[in-house]
Amino acid sequence: MTDTSLAPRPVEGQTDALLVADADRRFYAFVIDTLAVAGAMSAAAYAAQAPAAVLGAVALVGVFGALLAGGFGVTPGKALLGLRVLSVEDARPIGFPRAALRTAILGMATLPTAGLGAAALARTALVDPSGWRRGWHDLRTGSVVVDVRTTPVLAVPPVEPPQTVVNLTAMRLVPAAPTPPEHADLRGPRQTAPTAPARWQVAFDTGEAFEVRGVTLVGRQPEARAGEPAPLTVALPSGDLSLSKTHAQFEVAPDGALVVMDRGSTNGSTLIRQGVTKALVGGRPATLRDGDRVRFGDREMRVARLS
């Protein structure tokens, strides 16, 4: 069931150790949560022998699950499998209102349809173009499911340097260090020529390519916020409107690095480096390297260093 294209992917939040959860673990967590709801329904039906009791048990379990997910980012299944439901804006729990909406969507998609609706939601997560594996319910509630399991780090004992063996006979045969002349050149080190500033080029999948020469906004119809200096803008088409009006910005930093920042877009931005996809958190700059690709909705930008 595991696919190499569904391997865990990093998501940038409070720590770079967070990973977007893989599809298998999300499925197993969903099964555990569904069994918990089914157990509550069975217990209520056995105890009260009334449909109202069953509905009440489902509602109670839903409220309890929303409290857990909203306050701590967990459900019973996700807690057992090391997963968390977090906000895409700040990588923190999404709060009760959004968690209640997310739980309601999952419940309505699962119980009345015998799981067919839940399968449809899972499909939307698998085909998410951003690489975050956010289903329709995640998009509606601004959430993302991440893997918070820690990988133990093995302590490597320090390697002691070899002891130095002094050969006294050889030392007696080594000539003394030459005495510097009286009029030695006391001038400081020679001045080296200043290095040329870094130059970067970006190329979009629409065919546009140019050298970065300042703050540049990208989106469907990008525009600066009130009070911001007038930046360069790149307007791109978006077939499915997954590209926001003002999606992201990039510029060359004073140290010569090219940095990109998502400007709170609806569908997010992702950095692809050597096959690994990292989700960018809105408002947090990320440093790019030569050969990196950045995905803005359904559009993609490739980075190349010119000098």
Image: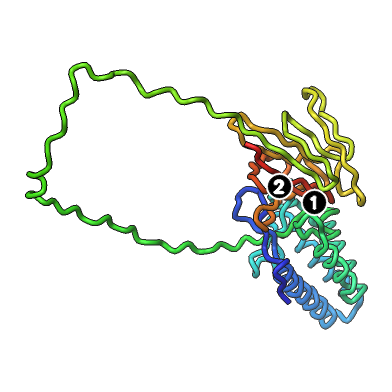
Residue named by callout 2 = 280
Residue 93 in percent (x, y) is at 71, 52
**Tag of residue 191:** none
Q: List x then y, in percent, for residue 49.
A: 88, 81
Which residue is painted at 12% across and 35% down in the image?
A: 176
Sequence-wise, which precedes: disc 2 or disc 1? 1
Q: How far across and how far down the image is residue 223, in percent?
A: 85, 31
Q: Is residue 109 above or below residue 49?
A: above
**Image check: 245 left or right of 94?**
right
- What is the three-letter code of the residue carrying label 2? Leu
Answer left or right for 21 relative to 138: left
Residue at the image point whose x is 81% and y is 53% from the top: 98
Q: Disc count in the image?
A: 2
For the view shown, which residue lies furthest in the top direction?
A: 183
Residue shown at 90% from the left, 44% from the top: 237
Q: Which disc number belongs to residue 142?
A: 1
What residue appears at the point 73 percent right and 50 percent down from the top-left corner? 270
Looking at the rendered image, the quarter that the N terminus falls into is bottom right
Q: Quadrant of the C terminus?
A: top right
Mark 2, secondary structure of its residue: strand
How far across and how far down the image is residue 253, in percent? 64, 32
Q: Name the image quarter holding residue 160.
A: bottom left
Pointer 2: residues within 10 angstroms few (<14), some, or many (20+)? many
Q: Residues within 10 Å of mark 1 (few under 14, many from 20)?
A: many
Amino acid type assigned to the residue bearing label 1 in the image: Gly
Query: Camera-side residue: 222 or 93?
Result: 222
Above or below, 18 against 36 in this view is above
